[in-house]
Image (cartoon, rainbow, N blue to C red):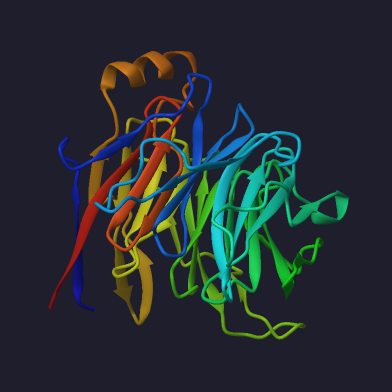
C-alpha cells in the first residue's frame, strides 16, 4: 500500500480565525457545504446555526451572512451539523441534544435556507437520546446517521423522498458494539466504506467497515465488529472526527486536551486499519486558556467540531471560535 503523509499548516499567518458574533455563543459543531463555499456552525447555548460565506479571495467572511434561530427554527441545543445535495437543492441537518434532528432546505432559486425546518426526525420511534453527532451517509446520502450518546448506539434513518425532503422516523438500522461508549461524534469516508465514531466516555475511536452482505431492504450495513479500535493514551474525551478526502487520514478532536490528533490508514493482510498512535498532533489554542477551562471541567477546553473539504480543515471550540487550516496529503511509493 502506498504511503500517504499529511502536513498541516498551523502557522499564524495561514490559519484563519473567526470569532462568534456574541460572547454567549459557544461553537460546537461545524460542516462544509457540498461546494465548500459555505460553513455552518452550531452554537449550542444560544440555539443558533450560523452560516459563513467564502469571499472572492478564498477566505471566509468574518460575520455570518445568514442564521437559523428563533421559534421558527425549532432548535434546542444544536450540537452538530451536516450538509447534503439532492439534485439542485441543498439540505442542512442539525442534531439536537434533546433527541431530535431538524432538516432545512435551500431551494435552487434561494440564497439562504428556509427559516423553519422542512422536516424533523423526533419522537419515541426515533430512539434518539442525547444525539450529539449527525452525518449523511456517502456516497448518495440515502441515509442519515446520528449518535445516541446515552444509548451507546448509532441510528440510521432512510431517505423516503428528496422533494419534498422526508426521512423515515424509525431507524432502519442501529449499530451497537461494546466498544461504543458515549459516542459523541461520527464521520464517514468520502466513499462511504468506513464509519468512525468518537467514544467520549472511554477515550477511544471505533472504526467500522460497510458490510457487503445485503439486508432486508437491499441496503448495506456497518459492522458488526470494528476493523480498528484506536486506544491511543493521548486521546482525551474525543469529540468529533473527519476523514481526509484523498488519503483517508482520520482527524480527531480532543475536548479534554489542547490538541487534535491525526491517524493514518494502513493495509494489513488486504484489510485497512488505522494507526494506534497519531502521525500528527497539533496544539489548538493557548495553553493558559485551556488550563483555565480544564481546571473546572476535565472534559472541556479542547477543540470540538471538525470538518474537511478538499485541503481545508475547519475546527471550532467554545473558547476560540472557528479556525480554518490548510493541509496537504503526499503519496509515496
- Relative placement, left or right, of 113 versus 190 is right
- Relative placement, left or right, of 233 versus 45 is left
Residue 22, compared with residue 72, is above or below; it is: above
The quarter holding residue 118 reads bottom right
Give me the residue at 23% from left, 41% from top: 15
Give me the residue at 50% from left, 73% from top: 192
Give me the residue at 44% from left, 53% from top: 38
- Relative placement, left or right, of 258 versus 181 is left
Residue 311, compared with residue 102, is above or below; it is: below
Q: Nearer the viewer, residue 113 or 260?
A: 113
Residue that sits furthest to the right in the current view? 124
User: How far from the left and from the top, in percent, is residue 156?
Assistant: 69, 64
Query: Which quadrant, please, contains the C terminus?
Result: bottom left
Residue 117, compared with residue 317, is above or below; it is: below
Q: Nearer the viewer, residue 192 or 274?
A: 192
User: How far from the left and from the top, in percent, is residue 267?
Assistant: 31, 74
User: How far from the left and from the top, in percent, is residue 21?
Assistant: 46, 27
Amino acid at each position: 500500500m502506498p504511503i500517504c503523509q499529511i502536513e498541516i499548516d498551523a502557522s499564524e499567518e495561514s490559519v484563519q480565525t473567526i470569532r462568534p458574533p456574541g460572547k454567549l455563543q459557544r461553537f460546537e459543531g461545524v460542516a462544509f457545504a457540498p461546494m465548500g463555499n459555505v460553513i455552518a456552525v452550531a452554537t449550542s447555548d444560544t440555539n443558533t446555526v450560523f452560516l459563513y460565506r467564502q469571499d472572492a479571495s478564498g477566505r471566509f467572511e468574518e460575520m455570518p451572512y445568514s442564521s437559523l434561530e428563533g421559534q421558527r427554527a425549532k432548535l434546542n441545543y444544536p450540537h452538530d451539523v451536516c450538509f447534503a445535495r439532492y439534485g439542485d437543492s441543498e439540505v442542512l441537518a442539525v442534531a439536537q441534544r434533546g433527541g431530535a434532528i431538524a432538516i432545512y432546505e435551500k431551494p435552487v432559486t434561494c440564497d439562504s435556507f428556509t427559516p423553519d425546518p422542512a422536516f424533523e426526525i423526533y419522537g419515541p420511534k426515533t430512539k434518539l437520546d442525547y444525539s450529539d453527532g449527525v452525518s449523511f451517509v456517502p456516497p448518495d446520502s440515502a441515509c442519515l446517521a446520528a449518535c445516541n450518546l446515552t444509548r451507546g448506539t448509532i441510528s440510521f434513518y432512510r431517505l423516503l423522498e428528496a422533494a419534498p425532503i422526508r426521512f423515515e422516523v424509525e431507524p432502519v438500522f442501529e449499530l451497537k458494539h461494546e466498544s461504543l461508549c458515549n459516542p459523541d461524534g461520527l464521520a464517514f469516508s468520502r466513499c462511504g466504506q468506513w464509519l468512525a465514531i468518537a467514544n467520549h466516555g472511554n477515550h477511544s475511536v471505533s472504526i467500522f467497515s460497510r458490510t457487503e452482505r445485503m439486508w432486508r431492504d437491499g441496503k448495506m450495513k456497518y459492522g458488526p465488529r470494528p476493523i480498528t479500535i484506536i486506544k491511543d493514551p493521548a486521546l482525551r474525551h474525543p469529540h468529533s472526527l473527519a476523514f481526509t478526502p484523498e488519503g483517508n487520514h482520520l482527524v480527531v478532536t480532543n475536548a479534554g486536551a489542547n490538541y487534535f490528533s491525526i491517524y493514518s490508514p494502513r493495509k494489513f493482510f488486504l484489510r485497512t486499519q488505522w494507526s494506534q498512535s497519531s502521525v500528527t498532533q497539533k496544539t489548538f489554542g493557548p495553553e493558559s486558556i485551556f488550563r483555565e477551562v480544564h481546571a473546572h471541567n476535565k472534559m472541556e477546553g479542547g477543540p470540538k467540531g471538525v470538518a474537511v473539504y478538499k485541503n481545508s480543515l475547519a475546527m471550532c471550540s467554545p473558547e476560540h471560535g472557528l479556525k480554518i487550516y490548510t493541509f496537504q496529503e503526499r503519496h509515496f511509493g
